[in-house]
Amino acid sequence: MSEETRSETYAELAATGPYGVRPGHALITMVEPHPGHEYAYNRWYEDDHYYAGAMAMPWMFAGRRWVATRDLQLLRVPEKSAVAQPVTAGCYLSTYWVTDGRYDDHMRWTVAINKRLNRDARVYRDRTHVFTAFQDHESTVYRDGAAGPRDFHALDHPYAGLVLEVIDAESPERRGELLEWLVSRHLPKRVAGSPAAMVTVFRPTPLPGDRMTYVKQVEGVDTRVTLLWFLERDPRECWDPHFTDLEEPVTGRRELLAPFIPTVPGTDTYVDQLRQSP
């Protein structure tokens, strides 16, 4: 006999509230499996958590996992990062889009479902959250204007790589100035003629007080900016010409620039390359 699902409530909820396709919010989470747990962690995330802890939830409409093999980890800068200590920590990155205007609704569900998963022993303990935050979408800068995929396609389109960039403004008052420089001046110039089809720009939001205790509260909520560069080429092929000479941010400091490639869903591809170069 099936469990009670309160199906009538779903019909009521579907008739109200925003339901557009714009990614108004994101979950961006960079995680380091503990040494010796790489395969087990990957299987848990691939076979269970990606779905039960993310994609099966209301209003989380797109997702993708990314991986940094050891050679990609060694490309990261700066050496002393406020995000990752050491800067090579966090070999898996997961990115998810949440429907604009549905952040509060999604958060109530995600806190509840993760408590249930925890009670049911479906949470993998031997891992460290290096950088995990829900984020509000600020802007998207496109290389090709109106041509090509939009940001709501980004996690489904077969991009060859992703670069995570985290910048901290000098103060909360100066984050607006930093965002203006990024969106109006810096990013349009950098994506022109580059392998980056688009760059999405986000601002982190604090995690709820009733979050799971193994996820630390978000740092830099008032000063931090998070960028996702979606690449049409493997980042190893274009790192030197396109990412080693980025201008220093105005009124801020770049705390992380980290390249990734997409995982192959359902497989252990790349797991054997997390601790040593291929």
Image (tube, rainbow, N blue to C red):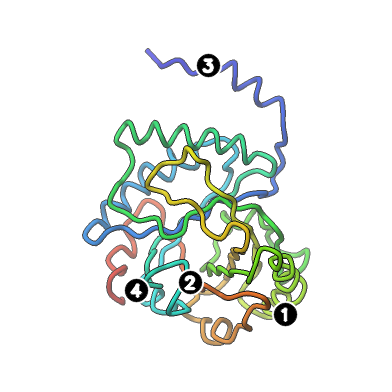
Above-or-below relation of 240 to 96: below
Label 2 SS: strand
Q: Amino acid at mark 4?
A: Arg
| Quarter placement of the N terminus | top left
Q: Can you tell which of label 4 and label 2 is closer to the viewer?
A: 2
Q: Are marks 3 and 2 in contact (CB under 8 Å)?
A: no
Residue that label 4 marks? 70
Q: Amino acid at mark 3?
A: Arg
Residue at 72% across, 41% down: 20
Which is more toward the observer, 48 or 84?
A: 84
The 10 Å Cα crowd at callout 2, few under 14, some 14 to 19, many 20 or more, is many
Q: Position of residue 235 (x, y in %)?
A: 50, 75
Residue that label 1 marks? 189
Q: Amino acid at mark 1?
A: Lys
Q: Is residue 268 left or right of residue 156?
A: left
**Label at residue 258:** 2
Q: Separation of disc 1 and disc 3 at Cα?
A: 52 Å
Residue that label 3 marks? 6
Which mark is first along the chain, 2 or 3? 3
Which mark is first along the chain, 2 or 1? 1
Residue at 59% across, 18% down: 9
